[in-house]
Amino acid sequence: MCDYSLEMYASRPAREDEKYVTTRFSSGSIGFVAPGDPTCAICMQYDTPLTLENLPEHVRAMYGVSAREEVVFARIETGAYKDAVRFADGRVVSLQQLGPDVSATIRQLLEHRETPARIAEPAF
């Protein structure tokens, strides 16, 4: 999905095997964009498996992860921002915490679902 904080921007659905990068939009919200099109938010379904690359040092140190990680796109139910990723150990990190310039590739698109997987709280 696209975080509600990105609703004011043009958006489109994610595509399998396309690379994305997190960016800070002019509103201050962080979301995914396709390289070369920084004004169009990329929306993806919750539970979509992703490969993240270029995770910043502060995220690696805080969560004990490497610069490249297999994650799942997730939704946070509490707080101002809903879009997040879930690491293999179950910890959930908001895209806001990841920051800009993190690369992501969708490993496999999921069939459309009516009810997204929900995560109660992020791991801070």
Image (cartoon, helix red, strand yellow):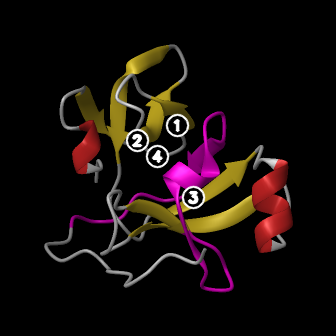
- Of marks 3 and 2, the one in the foreground: 3
| Label number found at residue 50 | 3
| Occupied quadrant, residue 42 | top left
Disc 4 to disc 1: CB gap under 8 Å: yes
The residue indicated by pointer 1 is 18
Residue tagged by mark 2? 15
Which quadrant of the rendered structure holds the N terminus? bottom left
Question: Pointer 4 and pointer 2: residues touching (CB < 8 Å)?
Answer: yes
Q: Residue at x 45, y 19 (%)?
A: 38
Q: Secondary structure at mark 4?
A: loop
In this rendering, the answer to whether 85 lies above or below 31 is below
100 inside magenta stretch: yes
Type of amino acid at the residue the image marks with label 2:
Arg
Cα–Cα gap, marks 4 and 2: 4 Å
Q: Nearer the viewer, residue 24 or 67?
A: 24
Cα–Cα gap, marks 3 and 2: 12 Å
Q: Which residues are magenta?
A: 86-112
State yes or no: discs 1 and 2 in contact (Cβ < 8 Å). Answer: yes
Q: Is residue 35 visible?
A: yes
Q: Amino acid at mark 3?
A: Leu
Q: Could you tell me which residue is drawn at 47 percent across and 62 percent down?
A: 84
Which residue is identified by label 4?
16
Q: Secondary structure at mark 1?
A: loop
Assess disc 1: are there few (<14), some (14-19) or many (≥20) residues with their C-alpha within 10 Å of its C-alpha: few
**Residue 114 appears left or right of 52:** left
Which kind of residue does numbered mark 1 sit on? Answer: Glu
Mark with earlier residue (3, 2): 2
